[in-house]
Image (cartoon, rainbow, N blue to C red):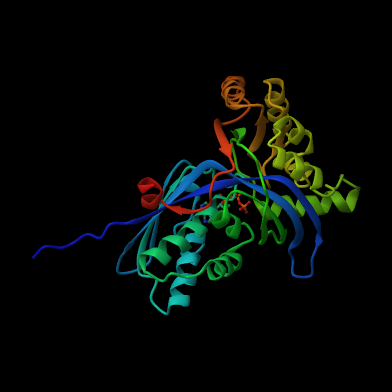
Protein backbone atom coordinates (compact mmCIF):
# COMPACT_ATOMS: atom_id res chain seq x y z
CA UNK A 1 0.00 0.00 0.00
CA UNK A 2 1.29 3.44 -0.87
CA UNK A 3 1.45 5.94 1.98
CA UNK A 4 1.00 9.51 0.83
CA UNK A 5 3.07 12.13 2.65
CA UNK A 6 1.12 15.38 2.49
CA UNK A 7 2.91 18.52 1.30
CA UNK A 8 3.59 20.97 4.13
CA UNK A 9 1.91 24.38 4.11
CA UNK A 10 4.74 26.91 4.35
CA UNK A 11 4.34 30.52 5.48
CA UNK A 12 7.07 33.18 5.58
CA UNK A 13 6.71 36.02 8.05
CA UNK A 14 8.73 39.21 8.56
CA UNK A 15 10.49 40.80 11.54
CA UNK A 16 9.45 44.27 12.66
CA UNK A 17 11.21 47.40 13.77
CA UNK A 18 9.44 50.18 15.70
CA UNK A 19 10.16 53.52 14.04
CA UNK A 20 8.31 55.31 16.84
CA UNK A 21 7.57 53.68 20.18
CA UNK A 22 5.85 55.80 22.83
CA UNK A 23 5.24 53.93 26.07
CA UNK A 24 2.48 55.27 28.33
CA UNK A 25 2.06 54.54 32.00
CA UNK A 26 1.41 51.11 33.43
CA UNK A 27 -2.30 50.19 33.09
CA UNK A 28 -4.37 48.39 35.74
CA UNK A 29 -4.20 45.19 33.62
CA UNK A 30 -0.37 45.20 33.89
CA UNK A 31 0.21 46.35 30.29
CA UNK A 32 1.54 49.70 29.15
CA UNK A 33 -0.47 51.82 26.74
CA UNK A 34 1.59 51.99 23.54
CA UNK A 35 1.58 54.26 20.54
CA UNK A 36 3.87 52.89 17.88
CA UNK A 37 4.72 52.91 14.20
CA UNK A 38 5.84 49.48 13.01
CA UNK A 39 7.64 48.60 9.81
CA UNK A 40 7.98 45.01 8.53
CA UNK A 41 11.50 44.18 7.32
CA UNK A 42 12.96 41.66 4.88
CA UNK A 43 14.29 39.42 7.62
CA UNK A 44 11.99 36.46 8.05
CA UNK A 45 11.11 33.20 9.74
CA UNK A 46 9.51 30.29 7.91
CA UNK A 47 6.83 28.16 9.53
CA UNK A 48 5.62 24.89 7.98
CA UNK A 49 2.78 22.67 9.14
CA UNK A 50 1.83 19.09 8.23
CA UNK A 51 -0.91 16.86 9.67
CA UNK A 52 0.36 14.54 12.45
CA UNK A 53 -1.01 12.39 15.27
CA UNK A 54 -0.31 14.98 17.96
CA UNK A 55 0.91 18.57 18.23
CA UNK A 56 4.71 18.87 18.07
CA UNK A 57 7.01 21.83 17.49
CA UNK A 58 10.53 21.80 16.03
CA UNK A 59 12.77 24.86 15.82
CA UNK A 60 15.85 25.21 13.61
CA UNK A 61 18.23 28.04 12.79
CA UNK A 62 20.23 30.58 14.73
CA UNK A 63 19.26 30.77 18.40
CA UNK A 64 16.97 27.72 18.13
CA UNK A 65 18.48 26.30 21.33
CA UNK A 66 16.92 29.21 23.28
CA UNK A 67 13.42 28.60 21.97
CA UNK A 68 11.07 26.26 23.86
CA UNK A 69 9.30 23.55 21.85
CA UNK A 70 6.42 22.97 24.27
CA UNK A 71 3.35 25.02 25.14
CA UNK A 72 5.57 28.02 26.03
CA UNK A 73 6.22 28.45 22.30
CA UNK A 74 3.78 30.94 20.79
CA UNK A 75 3.24 28.68 17.76
CA UNK A 76 1.89 25.99 20.11
CA UNK A 77 -0.60 28.45 21.57
CA UNK A 78 -1.53 29.69 18.10
CA UNK A 79 -2.23 26.11 16.98
CA UNK A 80 -4.43 25.50 20.01
CA UNK A 81 -6.31 28.76 19.40
CA UNK A 82 -7.09 27.95 15.74
CA UNK A 83 -8.00 24.33 16.57
CA UNK A 84 -10.31 25.55 19.30
CA UNK A 85 -12.00 27.96 16.88
CA UNK A 86 -12.35 25.17 14.30
CA UNK A 87 -13.59 22.64 16.88
CA UNK A 88 -10.85 20.11 16.11
CA UNK A 89 -7.67 18.70 17.64
CA UNK A 90 -4.41 20.60 16.99
CA UNK A 91 -2.89 17.46 15.44
CA UNK A 92 -0.02 18.97 13.45
CA UNK A 93 3.74 19.01 13.29
CA UNK A 94 4.98 22.59 13.21
CA UNK A 95 8.52 23.36 12.02
CA UNK A 96 9.98 26.81 12.55
CA UNK A 97 13.09 28.01 10.72
CA UNK A 98 14.44 31.09 12.55
CA UNK A 99 15.91 33.97 10.55
CA UNK A 100 14.67 36.60 13.04
CA UNK A 101 17.00 36.99 16.05
CA UNK A 102 15.63 35.28 19.17
CA UNK A 103 14.81 37.67 22.05
CA UNK A 104 16.07 40.46 19.81
CA UNK A 105 13.22 42.98 20.03
CA UNK A 106 12.10 42.13 16.50
CA UNK A 107 9.00 40.13 17.51
CA UNK A 108 10.19 36.77 16.18
CA UNK A 109 7.94 34.70 18.44
CA UNK A 110 4.94 36.86 17.52
CA UNK A 111 5.80 36.49 13.85
CA UNK A 112 5.84 32.70 14.18
CA UNK A 113 2.45 32.78 15.90
CA UNK A 114 0.98 34.87 13.07
CA UNK A 115 2.47 32.48 10.51
CA UNK A 116 0.93 29.50 12.32
CA UNK A 117 -2.54 31.07 12.25
CA UNK A 118 -2.30 31.53 8.49
CA UNK A 119 -0.73 28.12 7.83
CA UNK A 120 -3.39 26.22 9.78
CA UNK A 121 -6.21 28.25 8.26
CA UNK A 122 -4.92 27.05 4.89
CA UNK A 123 -4.10 23.46 5.92
CA UNK A 124 -7.56 22.92 7.40
CA UNK A 125 -9.40 24.89 4.68
CA UNK A 126 -11.06 27.12 7.29
CA UNK A 127 -11.10 30.35 5.24
CA UNK A 128 -11.24 32.47 8.39
CA UNK A 129 -11.85 36.12 7.53
CA UNK A 130 -9.29 38.82 8.28
CA UNK A 131 -11.20 40.08 11.31
CA UNK A 132 -11.22 36.60 12.91
CA UNK A 133 -7.52 36.07 12.21
CA UNK A 134 -6.80 39.51 13.67
CA UNK A 135 -8.83 38.71 16.80
CA UNK A 136 -7.03 35.37 17.32
CA UNK A 137 -3.72 37.17 16.75
CA UNK A 138 -4.48 39.94 19.28
CA UNK A 139 -5.34 37.32 21.92
CA UNK A 140 -1.91 35.72 21.42
CA UNK A 141 0.14 38.91 21.89
CA UNK A 142 0.44 42.61 21.11
CA UNK A 143 2.81 42.21 18.15
CA UNK A 144 1.03 39.27 16.49
CA UNK A 145 -1.57 41.27 14.49
CA UNK A 146 1.15 43.40 12.92
CA UNK A 147 3.05 40.30 11.76
CA UNK A 148 -0.11 39.27 9.87
CA UNK A 149 -0.59 42.76 8.50
CA UNK A 150 2.97 43.74 7.53
CA UNK A 151 3.87 46.93 5.64
CA UNK A 152 4.01 50.02 7.83
CA UNK A 153 1.29 50.62 10.42
CA UNK A 154 0.41 52.63 13.49
CA UNK A 155 -0.40 50.51 16.52
CA UNK A 156 -2.21 51.59 19.68
CA UNK A 157 -3.58 49.94 22.82
CA UNK A 158 -1.04 47.21 23.63
CA UNK A 159 0.01 47.61 19.96
CA UNK A 160 -2.81 45.42 18.65
CA UNK A 161 -5.09 48.14 17.16
CA UNK A 162 -3.60 48.79 13.74
CA UNK A 163 -4.02 51.36 11.00
CA UNK A 164 -1.98 51.19 7.80
CA UNK A 165 0.45 54.04 7.13
CA UNK A 166 1.42 55.22 3.69
CA UNK A 167 5.15 54.67 3.15
CA UNK A 168 6.60 55.61 -0.19
CA UNK A 169 9.53 53.69 -1.61
CA UNK A 170 11.77 51.34 0.29
CA UNK A 171 13.87 52.17 3.33
CA UNK A 172 17.23 50.49 3.85
CA UNK A 173 18.33 49.18 7.22
CA UNK A 174 21.29 47.54 8.89
CA UNK A 175 20.54 45.38 11.90
CA UNK A 176 23.22 44.74 14.51
CA UNK A 177 22.35 41.54 16.37
CA UNK A 178 23.68 41.53 19.94
CA UNK A 179 25.59 38.83 21.75
CA UNK A 180 22.75 38.09 24.19
CA UNK A 181 19.01 38.69 24.37
CA UNK A 182 16.87 40.99 26.50
CA UNK A 183 13.64 39.93 28.18
CA UNK A 184 10.81 42.25 27.12
CA UNK A 185 9.11 42.29 30.59
CA UNK A 186 12.46 43.16 32.22
CA UNK A 187 12.97 46.09 29.83
CA UNK A 188 9.48 47.47 30.61
CA UNK A 189 10.18 47.02 34.35
CA UNK A 190 13.47 48.90 33.96
CA UNK A 191 11.64 51.76 32.20
CA UNK A 192 9.15 51.93 35.11
CA UNK A 193 12.11 52.04 37.51
CA UNK A 194 13.87 54.81 35.53
CA UNK A 195 10.62 56.78 35.37
CA UNK A 196 10.09 56.42 39.13
CA UNK A 197 13.61 57.81 39.68
CA UNK A 198 13.52 60.68 37.23
CA UNK A 199 12.11 61.72 33.93
CA UNK A 200 13.58 59.97 30.90
CA UNK A 201 12.29 61.83 27.82
CA UNK A 202 8.96 60.66 26.37
CA UNK A 203 8.24 60.39 22.65
CA UNK A 204 5.68 62.87 21.35
CA UNK A 205 3.27 62.16 18.50
CA UNK A 206 4.48 60.52 15.27
CA UNK A 207 2.93 63.13 12.92
CA UNK A 208 6.20 64.42 11.42
CA UNK A 209 7.53 60.86 11.15
CA UNK A 210 4.44 59.82 9.16
CA UNK A 211 4.98 62.72 6.77
CA UNK A 212 8.59 61.62 6.22
CA UNK A 213 7.35 58.07 5.54
CA UNK A 214 4.77 59.30 3.05
CA UNK A 215 7.47 61.34 1.29
CA UNK A 216 9.84 58.33 1.23
CA UNK A 217 12.54 60.60 2.65
CA UNK A 218 15.08 58.66 4.74
CA UNK A 219 17.12 61.76 5.65
CA UNK A 220 14.04 63.48 7.13
CA UNK A 221 12.88 60.28 8.79
CA UNK A 222 16.21 59.54 10.50
CA UNK A 223 16.18 62.19 13.28
CA UNK A 224 12.50 61.41 14.01
CA UNK A 225 13.09 57.77 14.97
CA UNK A 226 12.32 57.41 18.67
CA UNK A 227 12.00 54.59 21.18
CA UNK A 228 10.94 55.16 24.81
CA UNK A 229 12.34 51.71 25.68
CA UNK A 230 15.83 52.67 24.51
CA UNK A 231 17.04 54.19 27.84
CA UNK A 232 15.86 51.05 29.65
CA UNK A 233 17.55 48.70 27.15
CA UNK A 234 20.77 50.78 27.39
CA UNK A 235 20.60 50.71 31.17
CA UNK A 236 20.40 46.88 31.13
CA UNK A 237 22.97 46.49 28.35
CA UNK A 238 25.28 49.57 28.38
CA UNK A 239 27.49 48.13 25.61
CA UNK A 240 24.70 48.91 23.12
CA UNK A 241 25.81 52.57 23.28
CA UNK A 242 29.02 51.53 21.51
CA UNK A 243 27.04 49.69 18.85
CA UNK A 244 24.83 52.75 18.23
CA UNK A 245 27.86 55.04 18.01
CA UNK A 246 29.70 52.65 15.68
CA UNK A 247 26.77 52.42 13.24
CA UNK A 248 26.42 56.17 13.03
CA UNK A 249 30.20 56.57 12.65
CA UNK A 250 30.06 54.03 9.81
CA UNK A 251 27.67 56.33 7.91
CA UNK A 252 24.15 55.36 8.99
CA UNK A 253 21.68 58.27 9.07
CA UNK A 254 20.49 57.21 12.55
CA UNK A 255 20.55 54.23 14.88
CA UNK A 256 17.91 53.09 17.32
CA UNK A 257 17.35 50.15 19.65
CA UNK A 258 14.66 47.98 18.04
CA UNK A 259 11.65 47.55 20.35
CA UNK A 260 12.83 46.13 23.67
CA UNK A 261 16.27 45.40 22.15
CA UNK A 262 19.00 44.42 22.11
CA UNK A 263 19.04 44.48 18.26
CA UNK A 264 20.07 47.94 17.01
CA UNK A 265 18.52 49.14 13.74
CA UNK A 266 20.34 51.67 11.55
CA UNK A 267 18.52 53.63 8.86
CA UNK A 268 20.72 54.22 5.80
CA UNK A 269 20.42 56.57 2.83
CA UNK A 270 20.18 53.79 0.21
CA UNK A 271 20.97 50.14 -0.42
CA UNK A 272 24.62 50.79 -1.27
CA UNK A 273 25.13 52.73 1.93
CA UNK A 274 23.44 49.95 3.94
CA UNK A 275 25.85 47.38 2.47
CA UNK A 276 28.82 49.60 3.36
CA UNK A 277 27.60 50.35 6.89
CA UNK A 278 26.90 46.64 7.40
CA UNK A 279 30.40 45.66 6.29
CA UNK A 280 32.05 48.31 8.47
CA UNK A 281 29.97 47.46 11.54
CA UNK A 282 30.74 43.76 11.13
CA UNK A 283 34.44 44.64 11.18
CA UNK A 284 34.44 46.63 14.45
CA UNK A 285 33.31 43.74 16.62
CA UNK A 286 30.58 45.60 18.51
CA UNK A 287 27.90 43.01 17.82
CA UNK A 288 27.40 39.29 17.20
CA UNK A 289 26.40 39.61 13.56
CA UNK A 290 25.03 42.09 11.06
CA UNK A 291 22.13 41.86 8.60
CA UNK A 292 21.12 44.23 5.81
CA UNK A 293 17.35 44.51 5.34
CA UNK A 294 14.74 46.61 3.57
CA UNK A 295 11.21 47.64 4.46
CA UNK A 296 8.30 47.80 4.24
CA UNK A 297 7.55 44.20 3.16
CA UNK A 298 4.21 42.33 3.32
CA UNK A 299 3.09 40.41 6.41
CA UNK A 300 2.77 36.62 6.81
CA UNK A 301 2.11 34.95 3.46
CA UNK A 302 1.90 31.49 1.98
CA UNK A 303 5.24 30.66 0.38
CA UNK A 304 3.71 28.79 -2.61
CA UNK A 305 1.37 31.68 -3.46
CA UNK A 306 4.30 34.07 -3.41
CA UNK A 307 6.36 31.80 -5.67
CA UNK A 308 3.47 31.34 -8.11
CA UNK A 309 3.10 35.08 -8.70
P1 LIG B 1 8.91 40.61 21.91
O1 LIG B 1 7.99 40.20 20.79
O2 LIG B 1 8.32 40.33 23.27
O3 LIG B 1 9.53 41.96 21.73
P2 LIG B 1 11.42 39.57 21.14
O4 LIG B 1 11.19 39.96 19.74
O5 LIG B 1 12.43 40.35 21.91
O6 LIG B 1 10.09 39.56 21.92
P3 LIG B 1 11.25 36.74 20.64
O7 LIG B 1 12.25 36.17 19.71
O8 LIG B 1 9.86 36.89 20.18
O9 LIG B 1 11.83 38.08 21.22
O10 LIG B 1 11.28 35.80 21.94
C1 LIG B 1 11.14 36.15 23.27
C2 LIG B 1 11.10 34.85 24.09
O11 LIG B 1 9.92 34.14 23.75
C3 LIG B 1 12.26 33.91 23.77
O12 LIG B 1 13.30 34.06 24.69
C4 LIG B 1 11.64 32.52 23.83
O13 LIG B 1 11.91 31.89 25.07
C5 LIG B 1 10.14 32.74 23.75
N1 LIG B 1 9.51 32.20 22.51
C6 LIG B 1 8.34 31.58 22.46
N2 LIG B 1 8.02 31.21 21.21
C7 LIG B 1 9.03 31.62 20.42
C8 LIG B 1 9.30 31.52 19.02
N3 LIG B 1 8.45 30.90 18.18
N4 LIG B 1 10.41 32.09 18.56
C9 LIG B 1 11.26 32.71 19.41
N5 LIG B 1 11.08 32.79 20.74
C10 LIG B 1 9.97 32.26 21.24
The answer to whether residue 106 shows anywhere in this view is yes
Q: Residue 304: where, in percent of width, then height?
A: 36, 51
- Is residue 290 placed above or below 28 in the rendered structure? above
Question: At 25% from the left edge and 60% from the top edge, which residue is drawn?
Answer: 6
- Given residues 191 and 227, the one toward you in this image is 227
Question: At 57% from the left edge and 51% from the top edge, which residue is drawn?
Answer: 150
- Residue farthest to the left, as pictured: 1
Q: Is residue 117 left or right of residue 247?
A: left
Q: Residue 108: where, in percent of width, then height?
A: 54, 50
- Is residue 245 placed above or below 141 in the rendered structure? above
- Is residue 111 placed above or below 26 in the rendered structure? above
- Residue farthest to the right, as pictured: 198
Q: Is residue 281 left or right of residue 201?
A: left
Q: Residue 130: where, in percent of width, then height?
A: 54, 66
Q: Residue 301: where, in percent of width, then height?
A: 46, 53
* Quadrant position of the N terminus in the picture: bottom left
Q: Is residue 188 left or right of residue 205?
A: left
The answer to whether residue 73 shows anywhere in this view is no
Residue 134 sits in quarter: bottom right
- Given residues 151 and 228, the one toward you in this image is 151
Residue 95 sits in quarter: bottom left
Q: Is residue 175 left or right of residue 192?
A: left
Circle count: 0
- Is residue 308 placed above or below 28 in the rendered structure? above
Amino acid sequence: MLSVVPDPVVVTVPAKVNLHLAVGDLRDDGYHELSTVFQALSLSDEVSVVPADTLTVQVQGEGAQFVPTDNRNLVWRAAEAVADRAGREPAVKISVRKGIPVAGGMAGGSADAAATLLALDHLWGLELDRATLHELAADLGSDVPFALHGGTAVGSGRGEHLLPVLARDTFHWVLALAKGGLSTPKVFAELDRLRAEGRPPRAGTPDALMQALAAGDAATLAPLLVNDLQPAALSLMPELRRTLRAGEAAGALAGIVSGSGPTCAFLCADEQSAIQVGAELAGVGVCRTVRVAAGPVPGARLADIEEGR
